[in-house]
Amino acid sequence: MIEPDSLIDNPEPQDLGQLEMSNLRSVREQLQEVEYGYSYARRVVQGRLDTVLGVLEHKNQGDQGSDPILEMPETLGNRIKGPGLPRPTRGLEPPEWADDLLTELNDAVSLEDLSNLADMDTDVLADLAETISGIERQLSETRSGLHMRIERVQAELISRYRQGAGVEDLLT
């Protein structure tokens, strides 16, 4: 099992060119798995943030006749496609450790709290949204750093292929 903190805190070699192809691929796969775990956690955080913001917007607009919970499918469906090119699909199960990234979120707004959002004051909802936004920013920053590292490893692999890496290198 990959320990994401050790991989994130472990600096990559200064010269990726010194690594064997199999080691480069292994580093890339580990970084991609960690990125996938962070991506999963970020999506969960964004879902809770969208939920809180949806209830807050509902209250701020004074929609007394409608139920913000019944509007959740529309609220949560607004950002289902992100910018950029689609990424290859991965297994549906996130890494085992990914739920550990959600501890701070669960402390801020539990699943039980989500069922009581409509009863919360707008100031409490706004504070909650700010807290969740901070958690999302932290996850996004780490994820962005992972993307940069993955891109450097990928660039080294591509460079080797362009320099004539043999078929046996591609297959091993």
Image (cartoon, rainbow, N blue to C red):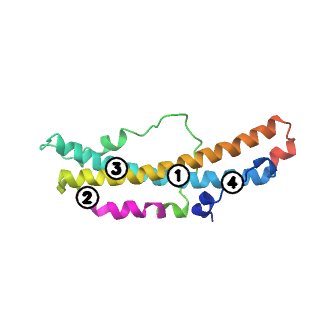
Q: Which comes sooner in the sequence, label 4 or label 2?
A: 4
Q: Nearer the viewer, mark 2 or mark 3?
A: 3
Of labels 3 and 1, the one closer to you: 1
Q: On the image, numbered disc 2 is attached to which residue?
A: 115
Disc 4 marks which residue?
12
Query: Which residue is tagged 3?
Result: 49
Q: Which residue is mark 1?
A: 142
Spatial separation of the CA atoms under disc 1 and disc 2: 30 Å
Q: Residue at x 46, y 55 (%)?
A: 41
In whole angstroms, how far apart are the C-alphas of marks 4 and 3? 33 Å
Q: Quick one: SS at disc 3?
A: helix
The answer to which quarter of the image holds residue 80 is top left
Q: Residues within 10 Å of mark 2 (few under 14, many from 20)?
A: few
Say which amino acid is labelled 4. Answer: Glu
Horizontal arrangement in the rendering, residue 110 relative to residue 28 (left or right): left
The residue stretch that appears in magenta: 100-116
Give the numbered dot on residue 21: none
- In percent of width and height, residue 154 lies at 70, 43
Quick check: is 70 in the magenta stretch?
no
Residue type of the residue flagged with mark 3: Leu
